[in-house]
Image (cartoon, helix red, strand yellow):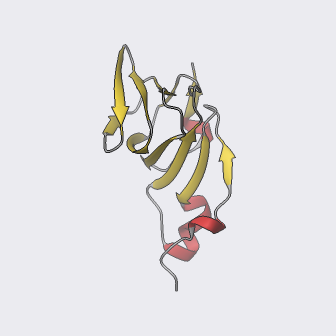
Amino acid sequence: MSLKTTYSSLNAFITRDSSEIRELMHPAQHAETLGVSAQSLAEARVVSGAKTQLHRHNQSEELYHVTAGNGIMTLADDSFPVQVGDTVCIKPGTAHCIENTADDDLVILCCCSPAYSDSDTELL
């Protein structure tokens, strides 16, 4: 049994907050084959000048780890710059969005526990 996914075989899609996401591992796609059950890992891309829609997840805790670009992260009433190597913890129920302030794509690894779900995404 293979215990990995291959990036080139994973399709990207647009989430409710308007970011492009590629699910690297998610129970909905990989529970049976890989045993993933309690969390998800995705790569998000935000193009230059774009901003995700303000939203919150009432159940999932998220970790954002910036792998390319830089931007402005908003958590509730606080906004701060993020750059390559930064990791942000987003607690359940916290309103958040991210804006790309660079000329290239802002790329973020997003880990969610429990796993990401559109039904747990409330647009604000």
Q: Which of 54 and 113 is in front in this view?
A: 54
Q: Measured along the vertical axis of the image, is residue 6 above or below residue 74?
A: below
Residue for point 47% across, 62% down: 37
In the image, residue 92 lies at what x, y percent?
40, 33
- Which of 48/86 is in front? 48
Of 9 and 27, the residue lying toward us: 9
Q: Where is residue 117 in the image (x, y as percent from the top left)?
A: 57, 44
Question: Viewed as shown, does residue 103 lie left or right of 13?
Answer: left
Residue sitting at 68 percent across and 47 percent down?
13
Q: Where is residue 47 in the image (x, y as percent from the top left)?
A: 59, 35
Please state the horizontal and vertical placement of residue 76, each as a whole percent of the image: 39, 18
Report the residue that reaches farthest toward the top. Answer: 77
Nearer to us in this view, 93 or 6: 6
Q: Which residue is drawn at 44% across and 55% down?
A: 39
Relative placement, left or right, of 8 versus 90 is right
Q: Is residue 113 visible?
A: no
In which quadrant of the rendered image does the C terminus lie?
top right
Residue at the extreme front: 103
Q: Can residue 104 be seen in the rendering of this structure?
A: yes
| Vertical arrangement, residue 102 with respect to residue 80, above or below | below
Q: Which residue is drawn at 36% across and 36% down?
A: 83
Residue 70, quarter of the rendered image: top left
